[in-house]
Image (tube, rainbow, N blue to C red):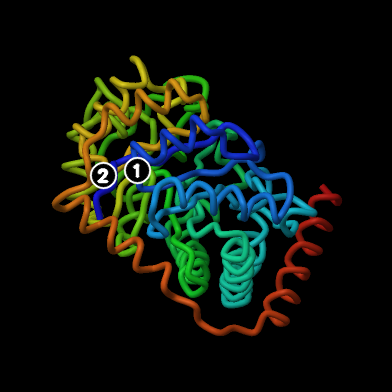
């Protein structure tokens, strides 16, 4: 499997000729879709099929961000209405822990079914970040709670639901974005918390779910570990913390290279995340010149990175049976409960 170590966005709902030529030459490991790429079910299937045909391989990760709440690229009528992670957290915190886990698993299994029917096989979820008082709202209700135990149980259920439906989950944002006081889409967050406390809290959910086959890095500086670079471009954070302390040996992709937390040209950014230890660079804008620069900065997948990519692709072969009616009922109940509580605040 000779594939380049990056995932690329596309410009719009139809594959342009120049994009097809780019995909054929560059052969990225994956694609990522956004709302700009999704206007109808048949159109999404056609776009994915055309892109895979250009790449020349069905063994391609096709990603989307379909967390629920604020972050879902497929909204009604393209996709079902989904509550934020906080809805399951509310249920869990009221003492209905198993019900919350069952609902989270069922919803993820339903989402997996929906995505696979569109040709999408990878979901950039669940979020394992632990928000703290004073942190930026960029995580907020995307989190499954503020305690390690709760986040681990709910996120484990979500990841299991995706994998049972043949969809690869991507845990994020490793080793933790919850303490950031800035939005890394717009600025570079710096976390000054001591490493011992980070190990006890922020890093712990990722360590507990280190067996999940794919993860996305955080564009966050952890000054007690490496004050000079965010985790995505820090060999110290990736080597010592993510691969070392956390013990993560799955496919590691950067967060989007286009975010303002990173510096340098797109070529320099792609080179830097790979050099730091990411297996794959993620580029989302769909701007062809940037896509070409990203491709120029990454190698062909080989060695450990190739092994991890193959292990991630193996998840796509799963298709376990499930009670979709029961899962639908649980999801409706969670949405109604969360909506009622939100309106009463």
Give the camera-side residue of 323 and 221.
323
Q: What SS does tag 1 mark?
A: loop
| Position in image of residue 62 (x %, y %) | 48, 52
Give neighbour class at mark 1: few <14, some 14-19, many 20+ (Cα, 10 Å): many
- Name the residue at 54% across, 54% down: 49
**Quadrant hosting residue 138:** top right
| Position in image of residue 161 (x %, y %) | 52, 71
Q: Is residue 247 left or right of residue 327?
A: left
Give the camera-side residue of 226 and 106.
106
Say if residue 250 shows up in the picture.
yes
Vertical arrangement, residue 59 with respect to residue 189, above or below: below
| Position in image of residue 220 (x %, y %) | 37, 30
Image quarter where the N terminus lies is bottom left
- Name the residue at 78% across, 64% down: 337
Vertical arrangement, residue 92 with respect to residue 190, above or below: below
| Name of the residue lying farthest toward the left | 303
- Name the residue at 42% across, 57% down: 148
Task: State the residue position of label 1.
Answer: 27
**Quadrant hosting residue 120:** bottom right
Give neighbour class at mark 2: few <14, some 14-19, many 20+ (Cα, 10 Å): many
Task: State the residue position of label 2.
Answer: 279
Give the camera-side residue of 335 and 13.
13
Q: Is residue 329 left or right of residue 315?
A: right
**Quadrant hosting residue 12:** top right
* Chain-order first, disc 1 or disc 2: 1
- Name the residue at 46% across, 20% down: 260
| Name of the residue lying farthest toward the top | 264
């Amino acid at each position: 499997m000779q594939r380049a170590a990056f995932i690329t966005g596309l410009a719009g709902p139809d594959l342009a000729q120049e994009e097809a030529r780019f995909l054929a030459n560059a052969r990225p490991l994956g694609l990522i879709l956004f709302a700009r790429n999704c206007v109808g079910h048949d159109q999404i299937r056609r776009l994915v099929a055309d892109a895979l045909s250009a790449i020349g391989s069905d063994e391609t990760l096709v990603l989307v961000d379909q967390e629920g709440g604020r972050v879902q690229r497929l909204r009604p009528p393209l996709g079902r209405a989904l509550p934020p992670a906080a809805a399951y957290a509310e249920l869990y915190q009221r003492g209905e822990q198993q019900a919350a886990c069952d609902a989270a698993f069922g919803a993820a299994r339903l989402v997996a079914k929906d995505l696979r029917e569109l040709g999408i096989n990878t979901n950039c979820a669940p979020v394992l970040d632990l928000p703290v008082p004073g942190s930026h709202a960029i995580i907020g209700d995307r989190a499954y709670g503020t305690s390690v135990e709760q986040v681990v149980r709910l996120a484990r259920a979500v990841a299991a639901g995706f994998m049972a439906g043949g969809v690869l989950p991507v845990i994020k944002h490793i080793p933790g974005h919850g303490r950031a006081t800035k939005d890394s889409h717009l600025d570079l967050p710096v976390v000054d918390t001591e490493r011992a406390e980070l190990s006890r809290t922020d890093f712990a959910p990722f360590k507990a779910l280190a067996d999940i086959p794919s993860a996305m890095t955080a564009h966050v500086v952890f000054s007690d570990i490496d004050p000079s670079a965010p985790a995505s471009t820090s060999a110290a954070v990736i080597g010592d913390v993510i691969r070392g302390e956390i013990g993560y040996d799955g496919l590691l992709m950067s967060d989007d290279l286009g975010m303002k937390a990173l510096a340098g040209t797109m070529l320099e950014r792609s080179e830097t995340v790979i050099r730091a230890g990411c297996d794959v660079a993620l580029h989302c804008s769909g701007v062809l010149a940037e896509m070409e620069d990203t491709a120029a900065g990454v190698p062909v997948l080989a060695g450990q990175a190739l092994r991890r990519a193959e292990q991630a692709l193996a998840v796509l072969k799963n298709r376990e049976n499930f009670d979709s009616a029961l899962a639908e009922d649980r999801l409706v109940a969670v949405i109604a409960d969360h909506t009622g509580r939100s309106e009463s605040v």
